[in-house]
Image (cartoon, rainbow, N blue to C red):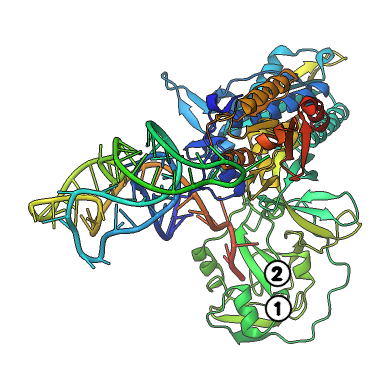
Amino acid sequence: MRSSQYLLSTMKENPADAEVVSHKLMLRAGLVRRLASGLYTYLPTGVRTLRKVERIVREELDKAGAIEVLMPMVQNAELWQESGRWEQMDAELLRFQDRHQRDFVLGPTHEEVITDLIRREVTSYKQLPLNLYQIQTKFRDERRPRFGVMRAREFLMKDAYSFHLSQDCLQKTYDAMYQAYTNIFTRLGLDFRAVLADSGAIGGSVSHEFHVLASSGEDAIAFSTESDYAANVEMAAALAPLNERPAPTHSLTKVSTPNAGSVDEVATLLAVTPVQIAKTLFVHAQQDADATGTAFVALVLRGDHQLNEIKAEKHPLVAQPLTFASEAEVLQLTGAQPGSVGPVGLDIPVIADHSAAQLADFICGANETGFHLTGVNWLRDIPDFDTADLRNVVSGDASPCGKGSLEIRRGIEVGHIFQLGDKYSQAMKAGVLNEDGKNQILTMGCYGIGVSRIMAAAIEQNHDEHGIIWPDAIAPFQIALIPMNMHKSVRIQQAAEQLYEQLTAAGFEVLFDDRKERPGVMFADMELIGIPHQIVIGERNLDQQQVEYKHRRTGEKSLLTLDAVVAEMQAKIQTI
RNA sequence: CGGUGAUUGGCGCAGCUUGGUAGCGCACUUGGUUUGGGUCCAAGGGGUCGCAGGUUCAAAUCCUGCAUCACCGACCA
């Protein structure tokens, strides 16, 4: 490609509304442009990278035995009503009507459509198992789109769905997809980890996420220092302390703590560490779970710990979704402002996190505005309570796998695989005749990859102060051909044209910068775009029939003789 | 959905307090200059100042409403 005939669209300055480095670089390098909140146009350079990611995904999925299909993005509401998600999903599901006032949705995912397809097309166990995938645009009306294409409303996704008659068969496909994903992210040249995950709104039981490790990641991942254990912090179990709770030594004392509401303020005022404070959170109770008809549940955590909402939501007494009591409700319940509340003397169920339940002689709110209690002890002062794992793990906690301690790192979720079971097949009555001639409901798996998000994640992980540093496998171009003053020198022009022809004929994707620009402009643009290999043609090297090679990532430079360029490039660039 | 802030040429911004009819840098066009790291000089083109209403002789500027965009927020006990 000649840059004079291409749409480069690079920018010197950062657009004001870009926050993270990948978003800034994608705008500056001319990969994307924003149309509206969470909606992006991909410019030619961006499309090139997107297509390369897609190609690798296709190849590995085909190898794993998956078959490509393409489903509509617009889906009729009946299917969603049948699966129950028409009611379950909130505003994230974009709904609209056609000219006949019939309800439709813009597909955020395709379980309903694929399950509908399979129940029509597949009637016998002999046709199973099946694993179908597509690469297609999805729409999720995100509460808050941000970070460019990282969390966009419209985005490109690979989604796959598998159908089985047994858990055993599903497990085999799941394992094959786990391996395919590992192959894909390895080939993409990304530093990634597979982690245990919660299955969230999609449903199902077993699930793994694939994360690209990057400090700007939105998710926290817990790793064991001693084993392969890795889990999303949402999932990582906080083990109960092994030692016994110390016996009470202090008596219950009420102290005045005016204007001290937060854990930190109370800790400072009373000259203690947050570890000695218990904080109490009130959430709505699961209405039908408790015969007492109580509307709220108190959750107690150690002051230095954070509530894990997903864990809390799974507790049988807690309402789903997790809903915090309002300030007014807290006041009515305890008679105190939030900030001065605690578990002593409450007539609602109290659930203490294992670590909070381990405390003795601790501090908590007195349920009287402006007062706290010190020397508080479980059983003696709070006779009735339950314990559970309610908190996020923190760095240094014992690993749930039993080996080593946990370390927390951040990641960007680029893939997620689920064992769905029969959630959708049951609801939509997707079954086949088994060997006994009986109808049997199918077992399903589903597998997603955020194709457009991979582009942003790759940049988060691979950039420097000059711009993007693409991994070879997904670079929009492999080689930047940069002639110095081609418009003044016939021999430079001839050498450049010849090299362009040779390299292109050898199958390389070359961006030939034939613009009438000064060298600095060309270098800056080629580095910003992140082309991994540069060839610079200048007068002084041409005297020796040589050109300069420069590697974008390492900065390594070397001189190549003209007739050796193609062979050298073949040696340096692993063909994908 | 709540809070905060922003909206002036393609991009980044000033002007608004104190109303008088829009300016800077980059980018773009033309000519010259320069040529292995975003040269320099000159001359140009491009803006209903987010939209609608109001106040006023006069509104980018003051007032009201709306829209869009961004950031923060479901960790508060």
Q: Measured along the vertical axis of the image, is residue A137 above or below residue A151?
A: above
Q: Measured along the vertical axis of the image, is residue A437 above or below residue A210?
A: above
Residue A474 in the image: x percent, y percent?
71, 32
Q: Which mark is residue A273?
A: 1
Q: Quadrant of the N terminus of chain A?
A: top right
Residue A548 in the image: x percent, y percent?
73, 36
- The reply to whether residue A488 is visible in this rendering is yes
Toward which corner of the image does residue A507 lie, by quadrant?
top right
Q: Secondary structure at mark 2?
A: loop
Residue A117 in the image: x percent, y percent?
67, 17
Q: Residues at badges 1 and 2 in contact (C-beta under 8 Å)? A: yes
Q: Type of residue at label 1? A: Thr
**Frontmost residue, A266 versus A565:** A565
Q: Secondary structure at mark 1?
A: loop
Kindly identify which chain the residue marked by label 1 belongs to.
A
**Frontmost residue, A158 versus A80:** A158
Q: Measured along the vertical axis of the image, is residue A274 above or below residue A167?
A: below
Residue density around tag 1, few if under 14, some if 14–19, many if 20 or more, within 10 Å: some
Residue A229 in the image: x percent, y percent?
86, 50
Q: Which mark is residue A304?
A: 2
The residue sitting at 69% across, 57% down in the picture is: A308
Kindly identify which chain the residue marked by label 2 belongs to.
A
Q: Measured along the vertical axis of the image, is residue A462 above or below residue A336?
A: above
